[in-house]
Image (tube, rainbow, N blue to C red):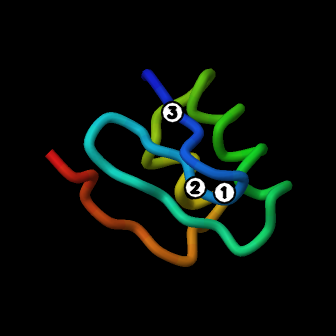
């Protein structure tokens, strides 16, 4: 899955932006998505916010 790091705490995966409260959790989430499915990574590295990316 393609990820885009928007800020130190925001990661975009496809059309969804995931926001984390700690930079290290965002790092781990981004690394996880590179190897596994996003649903699994959301459970392992829970975001504090999830929102649709602007079109």
Mark 1 vs mark 3: in front: 3
Q: Are marks 1 and 3 in contact (CB under 8 Å)?
A: no
Q: Residues within 10 Å of mark 2 (few under 14, many from 20)?
A: many
- Residue drawn 32% across the image and 66% down it: 51
**Front residue (pair 28, 19):** 19
Q: Residues within 10 Å of mark 3 (few under 14, many from 20)?
A: few
Where is residue 9? Give x, y as percent: 67, 59
Name the secondary structure under disc 2: strand
* Residue at the extreme right of the image, as rendered: 24
The correct choice, above or below, for 4 with respect to 49 in the image is: above
Name the secondary structure under disc 1: helix
Q: How far apart, in angstroms, are the residues tagged by discs 1 and 3?
A: 19 Å
Where is residue 18? Give x, y as percent: 48, 58
- Residue drawn 56% across the image and 77% down it: 48
Name the secondary structure under disc 3: strand
**What residue did someone put label 1 on?**
44
Mark 1 or mark 3: whose residue is earlier in sequence: 3
Residue 4's disc is 3
- Residue drawn 32% across the image and 35% down it: 14
Q: Horizontally, is 25 left or right of 52 in the view?
A: right
Q: Residues within 10 Å of mark 1 (few under 14, many from 20)?
A: few
Q: How far apart, in angstroms, are the residues tagged by discs 2 and 3?
A: 9 Å
């Amino acid at each position: 899955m393609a990820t885009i790091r928007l800020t130190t705490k925001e990661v975009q995966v496809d059309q969804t932006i995931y926001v984390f409260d700690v930079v290290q959790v965002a790092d781990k989430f981004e690394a996880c998505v590179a190897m596994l499915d996003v649903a699994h990574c959301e459970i392992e590295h829970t975001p504090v916010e999830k929102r649709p990316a602007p079109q």
